[in-house]
Amino acid sequence: MTLCIGLMSGTSADGMDACLVDITPEKVTMIDALCIDYPDEVSDFFKALAVSETLSAELIMDADRLIAQYGVQAVVSLLEKNELSARDISLIGSHGHTLRHRPQPDGFSWQIGDPSWLAEYTGITCVADFRRRDIAAGGEGAPLVPAFHRFAMQPHQPCAVLNIGGIANLTVIDAHQDKTLGFDTGPGNALMDEYCRAITGCSCDVGGASAARGVVIPELLEEWLKHPYFVEVPPKSTGRELFNLQQLAIPAHYSPDDVLATLTELTATTIADATKRYAPELKDLYVCGGGLKNSHLMERITAHMSELNVQSTEMVGIHPDWMEAMAFAWLGWRTVNHLSGNLPAVTGAQGERILGGIYPGSTGSSHQK
């Protein structure tokens, strides 16, 4: 048994996901998982950092340490919950929290969450900074989860995995697993959540209830769909730098319910358009991520793709809440075993690369109980 922990703080900036998994060369088995929710002020802080034009070095380092501290809290809580010690865990695969993502050409991607702090205060070897090696090799550095989707799904017929986090990404896998396409389709929950927080003070539109009461505003949707990202061809990736309320400039006289209906339709339409364009023969679409809990969003996605069998990844044995945390545990395992973690066909890198840096832990640390 090789026990590993995956950590993920996504673009929704709502909490730190931690997943305990058993990894073998053949499969990944989830044992347990939990999320340490960020207080509203912390969530707002991380969201503001993502779109800020100027950042002080002190602010960045404070955020770097804060993300790591939430990671430590998540790991310790997961260990205590399962009556395990640091010695039982082979590694932590930590995605961190994306501060900036500017893809090629001459791109970079910056994930904060000090891995040295994680290794020191958990006593467990930490693998982190997965994206920059792929970028150095000419890739986008994202999305990286399609490699895990392909490994975990092992389909007998063509299928696709749609992850709806703050940003939505799509992975298309053929039955022989020799052709995998993956890219960010555009906004997932980020715009809806940001609008809810700004207008209502709530973290999200629970279940899409407000959007369901509203009516789509055609002129707004038409304008938003003109964004150049939607017509770019893969490899491509994006983040809150491109998709945030500052970019949308929503007139104040519109009803909040109508705006939410339109933001929801933007996500559903761009997901459907991308799927139809790059997987026209697709029959099965498996969905994971927080967007799955938005029933109105799922209704709109299904309405746009009525010919597809749209269902949760839980139907194939993968809990939809923990897919990304599982993926980064697996990517960490790949790294320490000197195996590549990227898919060049997805990211555009010049070839397969071993991703990330390794920060050895020490179970003899004075910080351990």
Image (cartoon, rainbow, N blue to C red):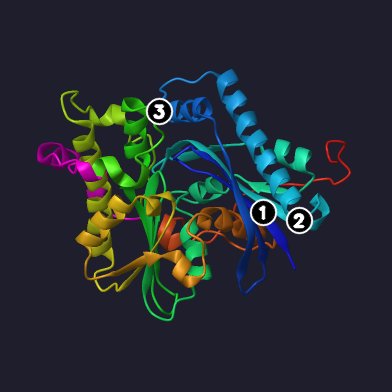
Inspect the image, locate mark 1, and give the three-letter code of the amino acid beneath it: Ile
Rounded to the nearest angstrom, the CA distance separating label 3 from label 2 is 36 Å
In the depicted structure, whether residue 61 falls above or below residue 181: above
The residue that mark 2 highlights is 89
Looking at the rendering, which quadrant does residue 132 occupy?
top right
Query: Label 1: which residue?
Result: 5
Mark 3 in CB contact with mark 1 (< 8 angstroms): no
Q: Residues within 10 Å of mark 3 (few under 14, many from 20)?
A: some
| Residue at 30% in and 56% down | 298
Q: In which quarter of the view is residue 216 placed?
A: top left
Q: Earlier in the sequence, mark 3 or mark 1?
A: 1
Q: Position of residue 73 (x, y in %)?
A: 68, 39
Quick check: marks 3 and 2 in contact, CB under 8 Å? no
Which residue is rendered at x = 32% and y = 53% of the image? Answer: 295
Q: Amino acid at mark 3?
A: Val
Question: On the rendered image, what quadrant is the N terminus found in?
Answer: bottom right
Marks 1,2: beta carbons within 8 A: yes
Residue tagged 3 = 51
Q: Residue at x 26, y 57 (%)?
A: 299
Magenta stretch holds residue 227: yes
Q: Is residue 10 above or below residue 311?
A: above
As for residue 365 lying within the magenta part, the answer is no
Q: Which residues are magenta?
A: 212-234
Q: What residue is at 15 percent from the left and 42 percent from the top?
A: 215
Q: What's the CA distance linking mark 3 and mark 1?
A: 29 Å
Question: Residue 96 in the image: x percent, y percent?
Answer: 57, 41
Mark 2 burial class by Cα count in 10 Å: few <14, some 14-19, many 20+: many
State the SS at label 1. strand
- Marked residue nearer the N-terminal end (3 or 2): 3
Amino acid type of disc 2? Ile
The answer to whether residue 292 is seen in the rendering is yes
